[in-house]
Image (cartoon, helix red, strand yellow):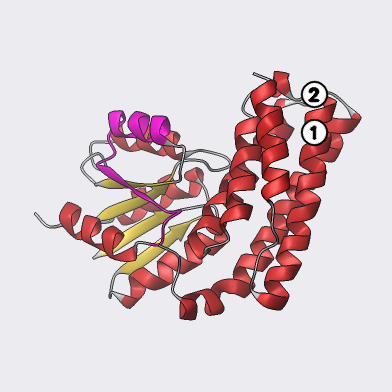
């Protein structure tokens, strides 16, 4: 059951503020991983940020953002599967999350992330 | 009733703290496990609402710390979980947590009822 409309309207600014902070952390960590081998600190940073982003997104009702964040969280659980292709897929997907937040701010409607979700899900499945 | 809410996510922390206060529950918040242990030790609340994945000390560290302190181990702990955390929740229950609520679902009534269940003796 999603948040009621009154609460959603009241807490949307806080959601946008914190989500943007999480996305910035995720983006920075992914970027560093692409420059060098993923390390435990970067993995932990992404794990905690995506866990929080997923939780708050699902709670307020932006389920695709929540699902995508949860998928990234799952993907980074094993840093040995974090190849360049996977990191780049996640990097592009996270850019789309930023766009989705802009859409939410304007229209209270998240972007369609079904393609990004499918791409990441397939890649994670293939890397096992 | 006095609750300590240990949750690193600012959005969830502010939202749930406000909702609980609207039910006349006194709420103290902690932003990570380390602060959580400090506040729980100082306040000795009626219940702890505990996230598991946090920076510094995580929820499991908090549960361990509580179980090792005879003045704290009786405080009921309710886990704030998300989807896909079933294994983590089971581990938390084994460490002494009394139950869980899924924070991904907006079910405040369910949370409130569980709090009442765990705090009414």
Is residue A85 located in the magenta-colored stretch of the structure? Answer: no
CB within 8 Å, label 1 to label 2:
yes
- Image coords of residue B4 (percent x, y): 36, 57
- Where on the picture, by quarter, is residue A100? bottom right
Which residue: 78% across, 26% down?
A: A38
Is residue B66 rendered to the left or right of residue B75? right
Which residue: 8% across, 54% down?
A: B121
Say which quadrant the N terminus of chain A sits in.
Answer: bottom left
- Where on the picture, by quarter, is residue A39? top right
Above or below, A114 against B14 in this view is above
Which residue: 69% across, 22% down?
A: A126
Labels in figure, total: 2
Residue range in magenta is B86-106
Residue A65 or residue B75, whichever sits in front? A65
Separation of marks 1 and 2 at Cα, in angstroms: 6 Å
- Identify the element where label 2 is drawn: loop
Residue B60 or residue A93, whichever sits in front? A93
Above or below, A41 against A65 in this view is above
Q: Which residue is mark 1?
A: A87
Q: For mark 2, does the 10 Å Cα neighbourhood hold few (<14), some (14 to 19), or many (20 or more) residues?
A: some
- Image coords of residue A68 (percent x, y): 64, 46
- Identify the element where label 1 is drawn: helix
Q: For mark 1, does the 10 Å Cα neighbourhood hold few (<14), some (14 to 19), or many (20 or more) residues?
A: many
Q: Which residue is mark 2?
A: A83
Above or below, B45 against B17 in this view is above
Is residue B101 located in the magenta-colored stretch of the structure? Answer: yes
Is residue B97 rendered to the left or right of residue A30? left
Is residue A78 rendered to the left or right of residue A25? left
- Image coords of residue B117 (percent x, y): 16, 55
Which residue: 54% across, 43% down?
A: B54
């Amino acid at each position: 059951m999603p948040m009621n409309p009154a609460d959603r309207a009241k807490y949307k600014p806080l959601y946008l503020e914190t989500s943007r902070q999480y996305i910035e952390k995720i983006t920075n960590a992914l970027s560093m991983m692409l420059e060098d081998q993923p390390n435990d600190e970067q993995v932990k940073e992404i794990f905690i940020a995506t866990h929080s982003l997923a939780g708050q997104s699902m709670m307020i009702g932006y389920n695709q953002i929540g699902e995508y964040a949860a998928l990234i969280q799952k993907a980074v659980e094993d840093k040995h599967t974090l190849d360049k292709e996977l990191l780049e897929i996640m990097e592009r997907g996270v850019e789309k999350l930023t766009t989705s937040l802009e859409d939410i701010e304007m229209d209270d409607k998240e972007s369609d992330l079904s393609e990004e979700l499918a791409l990441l899900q397939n890649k994670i499945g293939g890397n096992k | 009733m006095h609750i300590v809410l240990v949750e690193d996510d600012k959005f969830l922390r502010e939202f749930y703290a406000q909702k609980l206060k609207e039910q006349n529950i006194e709420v103290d918040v902690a932003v990570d496990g380390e602060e959580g242990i400090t506040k729980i030790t100082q306040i000795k609340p009626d219940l702890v609402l505990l996230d598991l994945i946090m920076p510094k000390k995580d929820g499991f560290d908090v549960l361990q710390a509580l179980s090792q302190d005879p003045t704290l181990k009786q405080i009921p702990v309710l886990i704030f979980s998300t989807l896909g955390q079933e294994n983590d929740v089971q581990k938390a229950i084994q460490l002494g947590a009394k139950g869980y609520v899924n924070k991904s679902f907006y079910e405040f009534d369910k949370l409130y009822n569980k709090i009442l269940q765990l705090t009414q003796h």
